[in-house]
Amino acid sequence: MPRVVLVNPQIPPNTGNIARTCAATGTELHLVGPLGFELSDRYLKRAGLDYWEHVNLHYHSCFDAFRTHHRTLGGRWLGFSTSGVCSYIDMPYRDDDWLLFGCETAGLPQSVLQECTSTLHIPMAQSGVRSLNLSVSVAIGLFESRRQLGLL
């Protein structure tokens, strides 16, 4: 089953909402530090409601630690970015995919994007709108991968 990876998330309620989505779908959530908040943050906990016990949460202190963890499991890195080459809809997803999302203000660092197997974007109909909220983007990407894999 695809996994969700948040690289340097900054806004606690976004991460809490994503955690709730991951709990509802049984999806692993990987947080890659440094984070812009403490895991004990009340806004993070509030956004996740009482679902935290259902979140399969993994914390990696830095990207190198995450990379080492990934090597033991394998799978593709699919980086979501406003500069992604492929529409998220056109990607044929696999069970071993890792869906990578960057922080709310800067997205995924270029160094991470270069390591991704593919970079994906969510098309915007309005040219003046660069991107969606992080928690919305994660939900869109995760549910499309689950739909293609017959996990809905």
Image: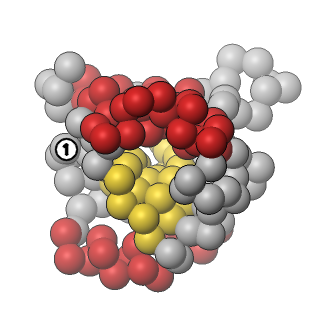
Q: Nearer the viewer, residue 114 or 139?
A: 139
Q: Where, quadrant-wise, is the N terminus in this rendering?
A: top left
x and y percentages locating residue 126 in the rendered image: 76, 18
x and y percentages locating residue 131 in the rendered image: 70, 33
Q: Nearer the viewer, residue 6 or 148?
A: 6
x and y percentages locating residue 39 in the rendered image: 55, 56
Residue beneath the point at 56% across and 31% down: 47
Q: Is residue 73 above or below residue 95?
A: below
Residue beneath the point at 52% across and 76% down: 62
Q: Nearer the viewer, residue 114 or 144?
A: 144
Evaluate whether residue 87 shows in this view: no
Q: Nearer the viewer, residue 133 or 78?
A: 133
Q: Where, quadrant-wise, is the C terminus in this rendering?
A: top left
Total count of labels? 1
Evaluate whether residue 101 shows in this view: yes
Q: Is residue 18 above or below residue 11?
A: above
Going by the picture, which residue comes out furthest to the right?
A: 128
Residue beneath the point at 42% across and 80% down: 65
Q: How is the image coloured?
A: secondary structure
Is 51 placed left or right of 92 in the picture?
right
x and y percentages locating residue 79 in the rendered image: 49, 53
Q: Is residue 9 above or below residue 53?
A: below
Rendered image quadrant of residue 116: bottom left
Q: Which residue is mark 1?
A: 1
Rendered image quadrant of residue 146: top left
Judge the density around disc 1: few (<14), some (14-19), many (≥20) Cα neighbours within 10 Å.
Answer: some
Rendered image quadrant of residue 82: top right
Check disc 1 and give the amino acid type. Answer: Met
Residue beneath the point at 32% across and 34% down: 23
Q: Secondary structure at mark 1?
A: loop
